[in-house]
Amino acid sequence: MHDRRLMPANGRVAHVSLQGLVTADRFVPGRWHRVIAPVADLLIRPNGPRDRQLLFGARVLVLEEFEGHAFLQAERDGYVGYVALGMLGPDAQASHWVSAPATHLYPEPSIKTPEVARLSLGARLTIVTEHGQFAETAEGQFAIARHIRPIGAWADDPVAVAESLLGTPYLWGGDSRDGIDCSGLVQLSLLACGIKCPADSDLQQARLGRPLAEGEPPRRGDLIFWKGHVAFVSGPDRIIHANGHAMAAAEEGLQEAIDRIAATGEGAVTAMKRIAAPDG
């Protein structure tokens, strides 16, 4: 059974790789673009509900323009959906990523000038030169140099990344410092460490790491799954997760969370998994 979240086809159009596998009016190779808004909602349909979000600089393969939106597939994780056309620009290969929880872009190399954008951890930039504490982007804007790192210079502890996002407000489908959900927190933290990660908790449970053996104690960096929910183990009997109970990315006791979630009727832990080392 095809997963609509990862299937670059909508009946009108499909990616050429699906020829002979799905029905569509036409098959296209698509065109690469990138997100130019600080955060772009990835929608189930034009003007429909949010599935996930994409950050500034994310590369996307556009298959069709329809009702003011682009039907596309994200390079980050293969997720498919619709993004408003005004949030997309020409393709560009990023050289750096935002490693601080959040940062600003400025029109000049001065923090006293009004900022032109607020970017989340994980946003991507094309840097052409540096000016002291500033790094200039290909668009002629300026980022704080110590808030960014070259692509490939990843963080080494996803839990530390998640800890830097504590207090971020909970947002269903959110993937940024402005608002985040449980799977968004896990994905953003793992990607910051160079570890490929799907967007939703069911896909994360299916694809990430190995199950802990019976009796094997969880350790920092392991993932704990419930139906529709995921958390990082942050320490002995401690977890970090973005959750609707706290309405934020928050830390709490593991057993406390297990008991609380069970008491709400949302079920027991479905898996504990240990994720692999960063790619490369």
Image (cartoon, rainbow, N blue to C red):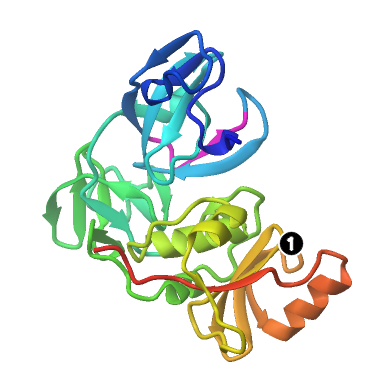
Position above or below: 207 against 37: below
* Magenta highlight range: 35-44
Residue position for label 1: 244
The reply, left or right, for residue 96 in relation to residue 52 is: left
Percent x, y of residue 23: 53, 15
Please give the count of numbered marks on the rendered protein: 1
Q: Picture quarter containing residue 254?
A: bottom right
Residue 101 visible in the displayed image: no
Which image quadrant: the N terminus?
A: top right
Q: Residue at x 39, y 57 (%)?
A: 196
Q: Secondary structure under badge 1?
A: loop
Percent x, y of residue 236: 58, 91
Residue 176 visible in the displayed image: yes
The reply, left or right, for residue 227 in relation to residue 41 is: right
For this rendering, which residue is in front, 74 or 130?
Answer: 74
Name the kind of residue labelled 1 in the image. Answer: Gly
For this rendering, which residue is in front, 26 or 41?
Answer: 26
Percent x, y of residue 36: 38, 35
